[in-house]
Amino acid sequence: MNRNALVIVFIIFILALIYLFLSALPEREDISLLSSDSNDNATAFYSDALGFGFSYPSDYFITEHEVGTGERLQYSIVLMPDTQENRDLVAGTLPPREAPPIITIGIFQNNLDGHTTEEWIQGTSFSNFKLSDEVLKVVTVGGTSGLRYNTTGLYENDNIVVALPSEVYMFTVSYLTEGDEIRDIFENIVRSVTFK
């Protein structure tokens, strides 16, 4: 066989290997942020300072608050359906009342304490773990291991906590009934999370 024929066979062999490799990869799950009958688009949130990003439905809006003491970072992101009533509630133009079911993401400084996820959940009041059934389930968020648990209070809550060396991320959704759409939206947001 001459040299040109060997090069062609080698190229075909490499292309066949690439094809086999790519076809063997699992398909990436398509993140549908709302129910299948909705055509709304997703909106991206990313913060280099907070070290993570996620996608959320375009018919939700975000409010952000620094809630730390100045000595420690504590940041809160709240997502809720984008309605005039909810915007008025956030703006304080409505009489005080209970907030509707919402999705919250709390970011807590961890580089001073170096908590594991379980230590943080069981050892801080922010986790509300005392209001849970104390059942922890392992989950993966953004390629990182975390823990999931449920709490009860004014609303039922699904909580997911991921502790990284510099921050702890707590994702929570409040809801009234098991079938509430906000729970599906929460799951899709969590699936879209990326850490830097």
Image (cartoon, rainbow, N blue to C red):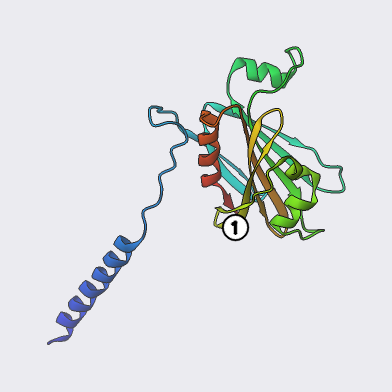
Q: How far across and how far down the image is residue 167, in percent?
A: 72, 53
Image quarter hosting the C terminus: bottom right
SS of the residue at dot 1? strand
The residue under the point 18% across, 76% down is: 8
Instruction: From the viewer's side, name the closer residue of 146 and 128.
Output: 128
CA neighbours of label 1 inside 10 A, class few (<14), some (14 to 19), many (20+): some
Q: Is residue 36 visible?
A: yes
Q: Position of residue 121 (x, y in %)?
A: 73, 50
Is 86 placed left or right of 21 in the picture? right
Residue located at (76% from left, 55% from top): 110
Q: Position of residue 94 (x, y in %)?
A: 72, 12
In the current view of this chain or complex, which residue is farthest to the left? 1
Q: Is residue 170 left or right of residue 1?
A: right
Count of marks overlaid on the render: 1
Q: Which corner quadrant of the image does residue 25 belong to?
A: bottom left
Residue 196 visible at all: no
Q: Which residue is mark 1?
A: 145
183 or 69, which lies in front?
183
Q: Position of residue 87 (x, y in %)?
A: 65, 19
Looking at the picture, which amino acid does disc 1 mark? Ser
- In the displayed image of the protein, which residue is found farthest to the bottom? 1
Q: The N terminus lies in which quarter of the figure? A: bottom left
| Residue at 87% across, 48% down | 71
